[in-house]
Image (tube, coloured by chain):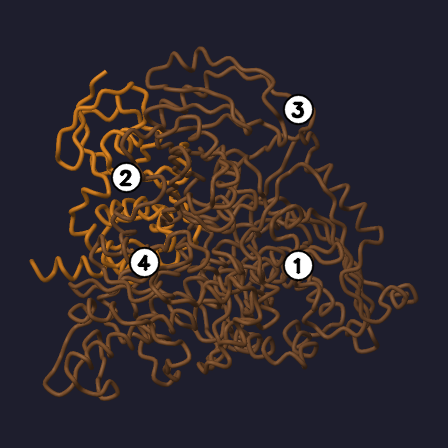
Chain colours: A brown, B orange
Amino acid sequence: MNFSRFMKAGASPALDSSRRSFLKITAGGTAGLMLGVSFTATSASAQSAATDSAMELNAFVSITPDNVVKVQIKHLEMGQGVYTGLATCVAEELDADWSQVVCEHAPANTAKYANLLMGQQGTGGSTAMANSFMQMRQAGAAARAMLVSAAAAQWQVPARDIQVSNGVLSHGNHTATFGELAVAAAQLAAPDVSALTLKAPAEFRLIGQDNTLRKDVGKHNGTAIYTQDIKLPGMLTAVVAHSPRFGGKVKSFDASAALARKGVQHVFAIDSGIAVLANDYWSATKARELLKIEWDDATAETRSSSDILLQYRELVDTTGTVAESHGSAQATLAQSDDVHELVFEYPYLAHAQMEPMNCVAQVNGDSAEMWYGCQSATGDQAAIAGLLGIAPQRVSINTLFAGGGFGRRANPASDYVLETVRIARQVPGTPVKLVWSREDDMQAGYYRPAYVHKLSASLDGHGKPAAIQIRVAGQSIMAGTSMAAMMITNGIDNSSVEGLTEFSYEVPERQVELHSPVNGVPVQWWRSVGHTHTAFSKEVFIDALARKAGVDPVAYRLDLLKNNPRETAVLKLAAEKAGWGTTTLPAGWGRGVAVHTSFGSTVAEIVDVSVQGNTFKVERVVAAIDCGIAVNPNIVRAQVESAIAYGLSAALADEVTLTDGNVDQTNFHTYRVLRMNAMPSVETHIVASTNPPSGVGEPGTPPIAPAVANALAAITGRTLTRLPLKLA
Amino acid sequence: MAYLLTINGQSHEVDVEGDMPLLWVVRDHLNLTGTKFGCGLAQCGACTVHIDGVATRTCVLSVADSVGKNITTIEGLTSPQARAVQQAWVELQVPQCGYCQSGQVMSATALLENNSNPSDADIDAAMSGNICRCGTYPRIKAGIKMAAVQFKNAAGATS
C-alpha cells in the first residue's frame, strides 16, 4: 500500500515524547487515530488473554505469571522485521529483558490496532515503524508504570524509588520479576499517556542496538507456521480454475471427470472460476486438469502488452492532465533549439513472493474465521463481512507469517481472500484452504502497471536543466479502490507520478503530466509503488544530462541538490564509501549512481558493473540510507539488501507480457527472478540521525535499477531506457 | 496404493497414488510442513530435502520413486554441518520472510556435507537453484562460510 503522501507531509509521530507533540500528531487524523492509542484492556480481550494466563496490561502488552512478556504486533510480519522492531520499542520503555519477550500477531480490531498513519488496520507504505515508534514505546512505558505501582503498593515504598532493569523491579531488599507482579498490575487502571515519561535517546539500551535477535523465530528449522501449513480438522483444500484472460467468465463447464477422481469432494462455480475441493492439494490440482470449461471472453482483455505499450507511447506525445507545474516549462522547451528527450518503457511486474497466495476460511452461519498472512485487516474484514452480509466484528482473523508480500497481500479488492470465502460459504462449517499454484499466482494479475514516460529538458548555459517536461502514461493503481479518495486528487493518482512531482533536483521550470488509461489488466502496488518507475526515469535522465554537460554525475547532482541537505548528505556518504572518483575500476567495469527519496527516507546507491560483450554482471553495491533513527540497524541493512535484490531482479529480468490477453509467463522458468549467482555484494551505511524513524522496507528499491543503468552508460556510452535492461 | 517410506529414520506407510510428489506426501499426509511448496516445477528449491544425502526437489519426485531411499526433511536434520548452518542462520539473521529458508538450509547443509570449505563459486553453483525473493543471498553466503568455519573448529576440537 502506498502512504508516502503521509510520510512526505511529515506526519510521522515525532520523537519528542511530550504529550503536546503526541497529541498534535494524533489530532491531525480521524477519530480512528485517537482510538488507536487507547491502551486500556477491554473486558473481552482480558478474558481471551486470561485463557492463556497472560495478564493484559494494555492492548499491546501482556505478561504471564511465568514471566513472559507478550507483545501484540499490529502489523503483518512478512520478513521486514516488524515483530522485532515493534517489540524493541515496547521492551525499551518497559525495561524488559529481551529474552523474555515474545510476539504475536494482533487480532483484527481497528479500534485498537489501527495504523496511525492510515486510520485503518493495515501494513504498507513502509509505515510500520514510523506510525508505531511512539505508540509502542508508550505501551511499554504504560505497562512499566503499572508494574511499578503494583510493586509500590506491595512493598509500601514510593513508586519513584523503584528501579526497573532487565525485567526485574527492585527497591532495597525487595525484588520481583514482571511475572510475579503481573496479576496485581493488571488490576490497576492504565496510566494517562500524558503522565508517562519516555526515555531520551541517550538512555536507549535496545533501540539502535545491532545485536538484538529477531523475534520471528522458527524460520531456520521449518517450525515457523505459514498459511500453507495450516491444517484444521475436516479441512478441504481448494484450487480454482481461473479464466486464462482477465475478465473472462465461465460460459459452461463439465465436472464429471473431475468429480470422479479419488479424493475430490466438491466442484462448483464461483465468481472467479470453477472451484475444486479435495482432501489434499494434489488430488484437487489433478482433478482441476480434468475440468472441461468454456470461457466467455466478451468482456475480457484480449490485447497484447505490446499493443498497450504502443498506446502509451502515443499518449506521451499528447498533453496529459497536469499534475504539477512550475513556471512555463512547455514554452521554454518550445523556444529551445537544444531539447534533450528520452522515452522510458516499463513492463508489468508480478510480485512473485515465495509463498503463492493462499488463505484459510471457515464460514459458520453468521460468522467467519480466517487464517492467513493478512496485510489489511480492516479492508479484508469489511469485504468479507459485506460478502456474507454480517457485521465486521463477526469476522475473526488469525494473522500468520506471510511468505513474502511486496504489496501483493494488501489487495485493494481482497481478491484471494474473497475467493476463499466464496468457496467456504458453499460448505458451511468446513474449513477450506485455498491454494494457488505458482502458475495461478503469476497469472492472476494485480501487477505493477506498465508505464511509458517521456522526459524532455533544455539546458542553461552551464549545462544545468532550465526546464523539464515529464509525461507519464499508465494505469492508475488507486482508481476504484478504497484509497482513491485519499490518493487521487483532481484526476491525478499520486502513486503514478510520485518521485517525478516534487522533483528533488532544482530545475526552475517543471511540468508533470499524467495519462491514466483504463484497461482490463488488474494492477496493484509493488514494493515502492510509483517510485519503481519514477526514480528510474529521474535518475537515468539526470545522468544523461550530466554526460551531455560533461560533468561528473555525482558533482552534477550535488550542484542541483544545493537546497536539499538530506539527499546531499546521503549521496556524499555513498560516494565516499564507494570510493567514487578515488578508486580505479578494473578494465570493462563501469560505475553508476542514483539517489532517491521515498516513504520518508533517502537512499543513495553506487553500483559497479562488469561488461563482457552484450552481457553484464552487477558486482558491487554501496548504499547509504537516512531513515531517521535506525531502531534496529541490522534489520535496516537487511531491508536495504532485500530492497536492492528485489529491484535488481526487475532491472535484470522480471517482465510480465501478454499475447492476445493471455499472460505469457507461468512460473520461474519464464519469469526469471534474481538468483544467488547474480547477486552482488551489498554494503549499507546508515546515516546517524535523531529524527523519528521513517520507511525502511521500500526505499532501497527505487535507486538500484537506475544506478545499474547509469553504470552501464558509464562503460558502454549507451543510455538504456527500457526495463528490464538489455545490452543486446 | 500403499508405499513404505523412510523419512528422518522412521518408516511411514502412506496410501496415495503413485504419481503424487513426495512434497505433498510429507506435507499433506505426514504433516511435515517444514518442506515448502513454491513452484511445483523444480525451479525454486523451497521443497528441497535430502534423498540419500543429495539435495533433491520433492515437488517433481513421485512417491513411487522415493521408496527405498533415505529421506531427510528439515525436521530430521541432525548432522553437525546442519547444526552449524542453522546456528549461523540465527546468528547472522539470514531469514526474512523465511518461506524459502527450509530449502536454503537443506541445500546449504548438503553442500557442506560434501565440501567442507566451499568457495564463492561453489556456493553459487550449489545455491542458485534456491530462490529467495527477500534477497537474503548475501547472508546465506556469509552463513555458509560461517558454518564451514564453525564446523571445522568443532571437528578440530573433538578430534
Tag in front: 3 or 4: 4
Q: Secondary structure at mark 4?
A: helix
Q: Is residue A424 above or below residue A22?
A: above
The total number of labels drawn is 4
Q: Amino acid at mark 1?
A: Thr
Residues packed near mark 2 inside 10 Å, few (<14), some (14 to 19) or many (20 plus): many
- The residue at which mark 3 appears reads as A297
Q: Chain of mark 3?
A: A
Q: Residue A400 appears at what percent x and percent y? A: 36, 48
Q: Is residue B110 above or below residue B27?
A: below
Tag in front: 1 or 4: 4
Tag in front: 2 or 4: 4
- Circles 3 and 2, Cβ within 8 Å, touching? The answer is no
Q: For the residues marked 1 and 3, what is the alpha-carbon distance in whole angstroms?
A: 34 Å
Q: Secondary structure at mark 3?
A: loop
What is the number of the mark on residue A43? 4
Q: Amino acid at mark 2?
A: Thr
Q: Chain of mark 4?
A: A
Q: Amino acid at mark 3?
A: Asp
- The residue at which mark 2 appears reads as B33
